[in-house]
Amino acid sequence: MDNKKVRGCIINGYLSFIEMKWGRFGKEECLENLEINGKIKDGYYYPNKIKISILRWIKENKGENYIEDAGKYLIKNLRMLSWLVRYDTPFKVAKKIEKEFEEIYTFGKMKIRGEKGKINVFLQTATEDDVTCLAYKGVLKGILEKTNYPGTVDIKYCKDKSCEYEVRY
């Protein structure tokens, strides 16, 4: 039995990205291909494999280059993140997400370390494959955009279900 679960708001965020990018029919095609039936509710937990399947669908049907965009969209458009606007630096936003990570996911850990102009983000047992790794990179890029800081996000490593990213701003 797979105990890895994710809040419905994450799944709905990716489905919303698909609808924004490829319309209602794109979203319906994804749902049909993945055999997702019923409404996904934001506050409920669902198997993480649904999130991974959606990201794989994007990669296989629309192109890998859209995975990071989906992650950026997620951080910029999740209703629950509206309160993040008052945090002014990428580091403060990343630290808040670190605290919320365990509320959103039932597995893995996120650790944030930073100094002026640089953040190192460590995801432990949280990434399943290349699409998840790229989606988190997009989330970190979205933080920079959301806080209006120019910068870069680099993947330092991604293996054994763990990743390290370096954010410079």
Image (cartoon, rainbow, N blue to C red):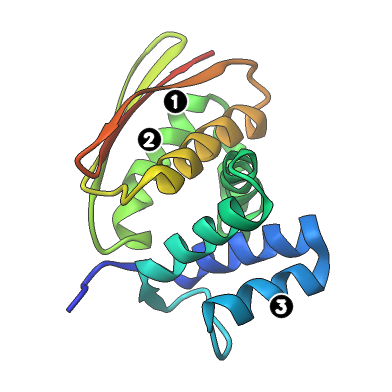
The residue depicted at 58 percent of the width and 39 percent of the height is 68
CB under 8 Å between callouts 1 and 2? yes
Tell me: residue 110, above or below residue 104.
above
Disc with the residue nearer the chain's start (1 vs 3): 3
Tell me: residue 168, above or below residue 41.
above
- Quarter of the rendering occupied by the C terminus: top right
Q: Which residue is mark 3?
A: 28
Q: CA distance from mark 3 to mark 2?
A: 35 Å
Q: Is residue 122 visible?
A: no
Please tell me which residue lies in front, 103 or 15: 15
| Residue 128 % position (x, y) | 31, 51
Q: Crowding near pointer 2: few (<14 within 10 Å), some, many (20+)?
A: some
Q: For the residue labelled by badge 2, is the local secondary structure a helix, a strand or a loop?
A: helix
- Give the amino acid type for the residue marked by disc 3 in the picture: Glu
Looking at the image, residue 62 sits to the left or right of residue 48; the answer is right
Nearest-to-viewer mark from 3 and 2: 3
Q: Which residue is mark 1?
A: 91
- Quarter of the rendering occupied by the N terminus: bottom left
Quadrant of the rendered structure where residue 136 is? top left
